Image (cartoon, coloured by chain):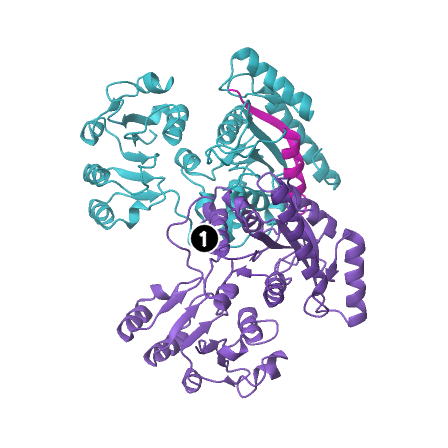
Chain colours: A cyan, B purple
Amino acid sequence: MPGPKHLILADGAFGPMTSKTANCIIRYQPDQVVGVVDRDTAGRTAADVLGFGGAIPVVASMAEGLGLGPDTILIGIAPVGGRLPEEWRRWLLEAIDAGCDIWSGLHTFLADDPALAERARRRGTAIRDVRRPPPDLDVASGRARDLEPFVIQTVGTDCNVGKMTSQLQLTRVLNERGVRTRFVPTGQTGIFLEGWGIAVDAVVADFIAGAAERITLEGSVEADIVMVEGQGSINHPGYSGVTLGLLHGACPDALILCHEAGRRFIGEFRKDLRFPIPPLADYIRWYEALAAPVAPTRVIAIAMNTQGLDEEAARRACEAAEADTGLPAVDPIRFAIEPLVEAVLAARGRYLESRRTGSVGTR
Amino acid sequence: MPGPKHLILADGAFGPMTSKTANCIIRYQPDQVVGVVDRDTAGRTAADVLGFGGAIPVVASMAEGLGLGPDTILIGIAPVGGRLPEEWRRWLLEAIDAGCDIWSGLHTFLADDPALAERARRRGTAIRDVRRPPPDLDVASGRARDLEPFVIQTVGTDCNVGKMTSQLQLTRVLNERGVRTRFVPTGQTGIFLEGWGIAVDAVVADFIAGAAERITLEGSVEADIVMVEGQGSINHPGYSGVTLGLLHGACPDALILCHEAGRRFIGEFRKDLRFPIPPLADYIRWYEALAAPVAPTRVIAIAMNTQGLDEEAARRACEAAEADTGLPAVDPIRFAIEPLVEAVLAARGRYLESRRTGSVGTR
C-alpha cells in the first residue's frame, strides 16, 4: 500500500531553524513528501535548504505544488501573526478543489473556517486540525501506572532539545530488534508523523494529565515498550504545567533526560529575563521527586543534542554529562544510539523482574 | 451604592459538602444573596442547611426565587452529567425575562446556548461564563517576579483544603490593618466573589502560567500585598499541571501551605488507586525547589483546616504541624488568624529590606 503524498506548506519560513515540523516530516518520512511550497527558497531542493531530504523540490506556488501530485497538504509552520493569511486561504481552496486533504498544526482551527469547511464538504475531502483536543477528555486518575508494558517518557532541560527525535530513533532501533515499541505522540509534529495522538499543550488545563493518560493507554495495546513523547521542561516559566501534567498522566516506568550541550538558558524568552539551566543532577532530582507520589520512576540515561559543537567538544560534553550523573549519556543522532538502547533494555529487564517478584522500582 | 442581589441556583445539591461555590458566596457575601433555589431543602434557611448564612430562604422554584427580587442568577453547582438540564434552561429563560443577568461557573458555556443568548440579547441582560478564558492569552515570560508588591500564593497538600478561604480571611484582616491587600481569583468561586479573575484550570494548557502572570500583574496595581489564589496540588494525579503553571506564572515571594488535618489520601480518586499525602516537609521541599529556577520563594506558614476534628485534636494537629515544619501552623477559621498575619508581615518586612539592600530571598 503506498503511503500518503504530502505537499508541505512552509511559505516564508522554510529553513533549518524555522520550520521544525516540516523538517521532521522530511527527515523521517522523505518518501511521503512530494514537495514544499516556499517562495523564498523556491527552485532549490530540501537538501539544499536543510542539508537533508534529498531532491524534494521547493516550489513557488500552490499551483506548482499541486502539479507534483500530492493527496494531502501539511501546514507545519505558523504564519506571522497566528491568523490564516488570505493568500493561504486561497491556496488551500485550490488544494481542496484538486481533491487534497488538509492537515494543520495551527492554533487556529481550519475546520472552523466557513469557506474552507464548506468547500471541503462539497469536494468530499478532509480537514484535520491535529491540535484540536478530543471533546470528551477526563481528569486523570493515575491508572496508567498499572499498565503492563514498560513506559518510557523523555523529559528535558528545555523545549526543543531533541526529546521527540531521540524517542523516534529509539523506537525504530528497538522495533528492528524485535521489541514491539510504540511511539505515543503528544505534539503536532509527532501527530503528523504517526497519524494519531493528542497535542497536550492544546487541551484545557484540567485535562493535561487526562489526555496523557488516555494516549498512553491507547499506545500500550500490543506493545512491549511505550515511548510517550515528552514536552517542555519542569522549570520552564511558560510550559512547566504541561510537562508535569504529562508526567503524572503517563506514569512512566523510566525517564530519559534530554539536553542540548552548551545551552545555558531556557530558550525563547525575553532577553532581560534569562532563566539559567541548572546542572543535570538538579533535573534528575526534580523529575524523580515529583513523579514519585503518583508513580515512582527513574532517569535511566541522558540523550544529548550536540548540534552546536564540533566532534571533539561533543564527545567531551557527553563524557561530562556521564561523569555528572553516573548515567550513560550520548547524542543518539550524531554518535551511536547503542548506550541508550542498552539502558532501556536493562531497565525493562529490571522492571519485568520486579513485576514477577512483586517488588517495586526499576533500578 | 447597593451591591448585587444574587439568587443562587443550587437545585439538587444544596448542602454543607455538595455546593462549595454557593456556600462560599453565602459565607462571604450573605448581604448580597436574596435566596437559594433547591427543591430538596426548600422551606428551610441557609443557616438550617449549612450552619451559617442566617435567614436566607431556600425556595422550590425559579418563580418563587424571582419573587425575592434578585438582579443576578448565580450557578455555582454542576448539574449531574455536566450538561444544562432542560428544566434549568426554562428557569434561566424565566429569569432573563425578569431582567436578571446570569453568572455561570459551568464548564459548558451558557452564552453559547442559542436560546439563552438570543433571549438575553433581546431583553438586554448579560450572560457571564466566569470560566471562559480571555481570547488573547500569552505564554508566560516570568516577568511577575519583577513586581514591587509582595506576592503570596497558597499551595496545598490536595484540592479543597482551604486555600481560598485562608487567603480571603488574610486579605480582610490585612486590609483592616491598613495594608492594601488584593485577592487575585484563579477559580470560579473567587471570580464570583470578586467579580474578576481567570479560571486557570479552564485555559488552554500552554497558557496556564501566562494566565496566572496576567492576573497577578493586574492585581498588583495599588497593592502592598497580592494574594494569588492557589489551585490543586503539586502531587495531584489530575491537577498538578495547573498547580505548577500557576506557581511559575505568579512568581510568588512567599507561599502558605494549606492542609486538612487528618486527610490521608489525595481526594476524589478511584478507591483502588489511593495516593497517600506525604509529610508536610516533602511539600515544602517540592514547592520551594520547583519555584526556585523561575523565582525563588519560601513557605512561611501552614494554614490548617481542622474541620473534621474536635477542638483538642485540632490544637494537637496544629502543634504537630509546627513541630514538623518549624513554621507557624494554625486553623485561621477556627482559631486565631494572628500567627498567619504575623508571618506574612514579617516575611514582607524581610522582602522590603532585601529589595532596599538589593539582596535576594525573603527569609
Q: Range of the magenta residues? A: A280-306
Q: Which of B207 and A276 lies nearest the eye of the viewer?
A: A276
Q: Which residue is mark 1?
A: B203
Write the residue at 66% across / 55% down: B256
Q: Is residue B207 above or below residue A42?
A: below
User: Disc 1 on helix, strand or loop?
Assistant: loop
> 10 Å neighbourhood of mark 1: few (<14), some, or many (≥20)?
many
Is A64 in the magenta?
no
Across and down, in percent, residue A151 comes to 59, 37
Q: At 69% across and 54% down in the image, what residue appears?
A: B346
Answer yes or no: is residue A358 visible. Answer: yes
Work out which quarter of the rendered image holds the C terminus of chain A and state it: top right
Q: Name the side, left or right, on which B233 lies relative to A192.
A: right
Can you give x and y, in whole percent of width and height, for residue A329 in the image? 61, 22
List the single residue furthest toward the top. Answer: A312
The quarter of the rendered structure image containing the N terminus of chain A is top left
Is any part of residue B157 visible from this angle? no
Percent coordinates x, y for residue A99 in the rendering: 22, 38
Query: Which image quadrant for residue A292?
Result: top right
Q: Which residue is located at x 63 percent, y 29 percent?
A: A280
Q: Residue at x 53, y 72 (%)?
A: B25
Q: Chain of mark 1?
A: B
Number of numbered tags placed on the structure image: 1
User: Relative to the observer, which residue lies in front, B354 or B124?
Assistant: B354
Farthest-out residue, front: B356
Question: Three-letter amino acid code at disc 1?
Answer: Val
Q: Does B197 appear above or below A116?
A: below
